[in-house]
Image (tube, helix red, strand yellow):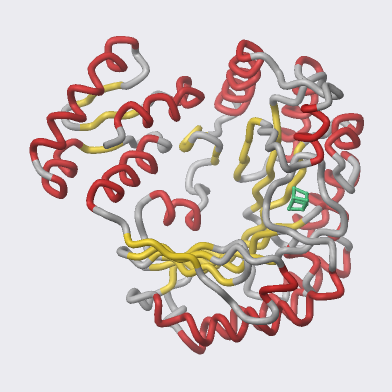
Amino acid sequence: MAAIYFHIPFCKRLCGYCDFLRSVKIQHIPQVVEMMHKELEEQHSFLTEREIKTIYFGGGTPSLLHPSEIERFIDHCRALFDCSTVEEITVEVNPDDITEQYVAELAKSSVNRISMGIQSLDNQCLKFMGRRHSAEQAVEAVRRLREGGFDNISVDVIFGVDGFGGHSLERTLQGILDLDVEHISAYHLTIEPTTRFGRALAKGEIKQVSEQCSEDEFMAVHQALTAAGYEHYEVSNFAKSGYRSRHNSSYWTGSQYLGIGTGAHSFNGEERRWCEQRVEEYIQGVIYGSETLSADEKLNEYLMVSLRRIEGFDLQTVADKWGTKAAERIAQSCKPFVERGWLVKNGDNFAIPATHFLVSDTIIGELFC
Ligand code: SF4
């Protein structure tokens, strides 16, 4: 089964750390929405898999769309695909868009999962990051969504922010646990040169946290959330039992997906396609970049997505799909990591223990073709 992703590339204000494809020119929303419907109409046959498992509205800020606009996209999917198999429809929201009226309208739609960017429950940290909501608004938004009947809520948290570890992070984690949400995504702050934070870093106005601090905060997050019963099932994701993100799991298990909108990527098992235009260009006509994966690239992809998950990868699968030579090379490359305890071998299965997820990129890099 396949997944569909809609990218709504608008934000009322830009956060200091954000390098997603987004725009503050919200006057273009109607044109972009119409272009996205046109793109869906023209590109749906890119997927050879016609049964849809998940639909996801990400951004940017999808909650800048009225729920009826979100439902119109879902209806359009129903007209083009077999959506009788859909299990999960997620919308990313910003806390300050979650008014009682918005929740009431959203509850009438087919959306059954909410992903909210909270990032911190420390108002100083939120201000530093340039978020446009307060901690109190975030807590109130979750309460409103619960009252509106949403029983599958995910929240995003950011750690590794210089000056906001220690008590600030502890308070955030405790506050998030008090919300009793079903799913938590916790990301380490990364500072890209093209962002406001990147420019401030270059001028020495802000600092990155030290490697030791990164490790300590990663472990603090891991321990607090797993002790509360969340499964650390992917590098950045924690879920209560039965509440893993089905949409993201599709990406990690090599399923087909169709991305609509600027900033969205698609994959049909062979070809990867993406559109990275600015909003003003996108509304004039969509231009795609594309690549067809070689066998080696597919193997690298398999290792990368598998090792980011607690399940890891299977050496027999590598041997079956890419040959015994590839399997032997990888088994050899795994040895030093197994000896250090960074990889756990169980028969043909190799997995990174959740406590070592922070070094997953290092391990994956060594195993690549
Ligand atoms: S709201 Fe999200 S997408 Fe928009 S600028 Fe902030 S982090 Fe980026």
Quadrant position of residue 17: top right
Residue 268 rendering spot, x and y as whole percentages: 36, 67
Q: Quadrant of the C terminus?
A: top left
Quadrant position of residue 304: top left
User: What residue lies at 78% left-to-right and 81% top-to-bottom?
Assistant: 30
**Which residue, as the protein is rendered here, is positioned at the far front?**
203
Q: Is residue 356 above or below residue 304?
A: above
**Which residue, as the protein is rendered here, is positioned at the far bottom?**
79
Quadrant position of residue 119: top right
Q: Quadrant of the N terminus?
A: bottom left
In this view, the residue in front, 33 or 73, is 33
Left or right: 155 in relation to 255: right
Q: Is residue 14 above or below residue 1?
A: above
Left or right: 300 in relation to 192: left
Q: Is residue 38 above or below residue 332?
A: below
Residue 180 rendering spot, x and y as whole percentages: 69, 40
In this view, the residue in front, 230 or 284, is 284
Residue 356 rendering spot, x and y as whole percentages: 45, 21
Q: Is residue 51 above or below residue 182?
A: below
Residue 116 rendering spot, x and y as whole percentages: 72, 51
In this view, the residue in front, 2 or 147, is 2
User: What residue lies at 37% left-to-right and 31% top-to-bottom?
Assistant: 364
User: What residue lies at 88% left-to-right and 64% top-to-bottom?
Assistant: 100
User: What residue lies at 30% left-to-right and 64% top-to-bottom?
Assistant: 270
Left or right: 120 in relation to 77: right
Left or right: 67 in relation to 326: right
